Amino acid sequence: MLRFVWIFYICTIGTHATTNRNFRSYPTTIKTYENDTVLLPCYVEDQGAQTRMRWWREEILLADSFEQDRATPERITVYKNGSLQVMHVKREDSGEYVCQAIRPSPWGHVTQVHEIEVMYPPSVETIPASGELEVNLGERVVMQCVAKGVPAPIISWRTKDGEIPLLDVRPQLSFHAENRNLSGRYTCVATNEVGDPAMAHIDLRIKYKPEIYVRKPWVHAYPGIRVQLDCAVTAWPEAKVEWYFKNETLKYTSRIVKHNDGNDHSLLIRNVKISDYGSYLCRASNSLGITEKIVELSEIANPAIFKKESRWTSSTSYNFIWEVDSYSPIIEYQFWFRKYKRDTGGEWHKLYIPGGSDAVSPVHVRSFNLTGLDAATHYEAVVSSRNRYGWSHPSEILRFHTEGASIDSSENFAETDGDQEQNRIAGIQLVSMSQHYPLAADANGSMYRVKILSLTLSMICTLIITFDSRF
């Protein structure tokens, strides 16, 4: 009984503003749930005329008061007062129900329309139905979720990073696969505040040609030791990876072993021989293309690495500390520095610094105090090393500043410079390795300012900075 009272309250809320004066009941939309019982009223004003009552749904006659022998559909009952009862409502019971009152002339026929809206939780299906989608890099991605439920569900989209911000609610998600990192699981969530939200997943895979990352493109080795060349490969479909040496497919032996762990591919060389030195090509291929990267195995020292302990020591000096991997003693270092100027570059000044200890060690650490700098000024520096086999590649460019300089975060002084300038340094170095620089006059005929340079390790020596007019 309480259930009927509650439903009738919903009916009152959903009543249409207009009515027919021949009815004492009102057109009503009833929102209810599955398995409820609904009563649709149809009360006609008694005007002393015999009234024939009919109920219709979608042009199908459900009941007729003048045809008592007519079988009414299961779960439907018509009462003498004209009301229609639907028991244990189902989703398919949703729709319009028309009450028709038929009276003799002069009253004629009148109708009243009610509606049942059976509310139920959302459900959702994906397009494609498999829940898997593959596209090529750069192609358009279209994925869709078809949701059912009453009220109509609202759809939102999520990834592992959270909800995707969209300008509107949409069942279809469309974008260009401009980045392979857009691969992953996409989840559509349908909610209508009836029951729990429904979710469905679409796994997107973006196909792209292999990409190779080589952490150490230059690997230093000494005869007799063991080394490992690394090559990280990402691709979809998965790539086939092969190693080449001297333009031929590498022949694997018990001494030279190929290994892979997921995306990480490596080449292990035991008991390095002089004949092993050279360029090793890591080649990755799939149906979308081929990518290659070179790893150089050499007896020449690895590029130096500036240590974080490098810092200014006064308003006009800066102490550098760098580290070099070399199984042969470092004979000398070539140190380049210049004032830093955004977008314009500047003249590089070069110094030769003795290697220090002659002891054979795989790791060489050098400290160098550069003095005579301008106060509150930004600079950048690079260093290369020479062992008995030749000059190494230059280090990454280090940006630094003397005491009092303003630190502009946009300059990013803790980082190294771009590849273009790095390559230019390498080119300058290869041309000038064997050259010695005498003092040169500047445009006014005066000697370039002499700077005192302190070398600290096991000795202190004084060097004179030279300015090379060839640059």
Image (spheres, rainbow, N blue to C red):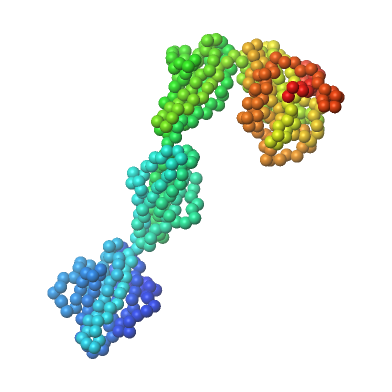
Q: Relative to 430, is 460 on the left or the right?
A: right
Q: Is residue 58 visible?
A: yes
User: Residue furthest toward the left?
Assistant: 69
How many numbered marks are there?
A: 0
**Residue 202: percent from left, percent from top:** 39, 45
Q: Residue at image x 24%, y 81%?
A: 109
Q: Residue at x 67, y 40 (%)?
A: 410
In which quarter of the view is residue 277 placed?
Answer: top right
Q: Does residue 257 show up?
A: no
- Give the quadrant of residue 349: top right
Quarter of the view holding residue 296: top right
Instruction: Name the foreground residue: 169 vs 163.
Output: 169
Q: Which corner quadrant holds the C terminus?
A: top right
> Which image quadrant: the N terminus?
bottom left
**As drawn, which residue projects farthest toward the bottom?**
48
Q: What residue is shown at x 32% (from left), y 64% (from top)?
A: 118
Q: Residue at x 30, y 74 (%)?
A: 113
x and y, in percent, of residue 344 in the image: 70, 34
Residue 309 drawn at (x, y percent)? 70, 29
Q: Is residue 140 left or right of residue 448?
A: left
